[in-house]
Image: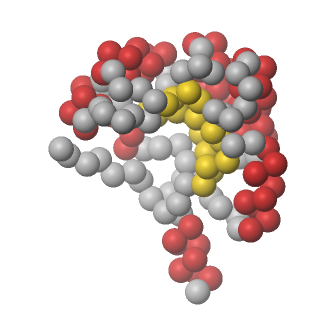
Amino acid sequence: MGKDRTELAKRFIIQIYDEAMYAKIRKAYAWPNVIFTTYRLPTSNSRSRGAIQFAKNHGIHVVTMDMYHYSSSLCSTARNAGIALAVNTINSPSKAGSLNRDGVRYLYSDSLSSRDWWETSFTASLIQPPIAPDAVPFNRYDD
């Protein structure tokens, strides 16, 4: 079951909300795909920058933040640290395009269709996520 468990674990992306959760999940299993989501953190650039630094120091490749935490300078900080940013919740194709031009790599959306999504030019970044190198890629679903 060991090899099967390893293969199965690659299909999961574990979402943590603070530094303490990281220690808990690592104690349970060495999950290869982890996202640090900041929406439970106090809204401040220093906390978001701290999350980016924590992610870099612990091999977490994606940090998610909502629009209240997001700024272009945080996007630059993440990019310089080798961290991809995901932003939630974006339901406007024009906002998605703006974030894409800023360097945001992923979006969470309640209403963007795959056509809206692809027309905002989020192509390569959706096909090749910067999670673990051997992670199962995300699938593109057509409407």
- Residue drawn at (71%, 68%) of the image: 29
Q: Is the residue 132 above or below the residue 45 in the image? A: below
In the picture, the quarter occupied by the N terminus is bottom right
Does residue 55 appear left or right of residue 87 in this picture? right
In the picture, the quarter occupied by the C terminus is top left
The percent position of residue 74, horizontal first and vertical second, equals 64, 19
- Residue drawn at (74%, 68%) of the image: 28
The percent position of residue 42, horizontal first and vertical second, equals 74, 26
Q: Nearer the viewer, residue 105 or 116?
A: 116
Q: Nearer the viewer, residue 91 or 137?
A: 91
Does residue 69 appear left or right of residue 134 in this picture? right
Q: Is the residue 102 above or below the residue 47 in the image? A: above
- Residue drawn at (59%, 30%) of the image: 65
Quarter of image, res 54: top right
Q: Is the residue 70 above or below the residue 6 in the image? A: above
The percent position of residue 110, horizontal first and vertical second, equals 36, 36
Q: Is the residue 124 above or below the residue 72 in the image? A: below
The percent position of residue 75, horizontal first and vertical second, equals 59, 20
Inspect this view and state whether residue 137 appears.
yes
Does residue 127 appear left or right of residue 82 in this picture? left
Q: Nearer the viewer, residue 88 or 7?
A: 88
Inspect this view and state whether residue 80 appears.
no
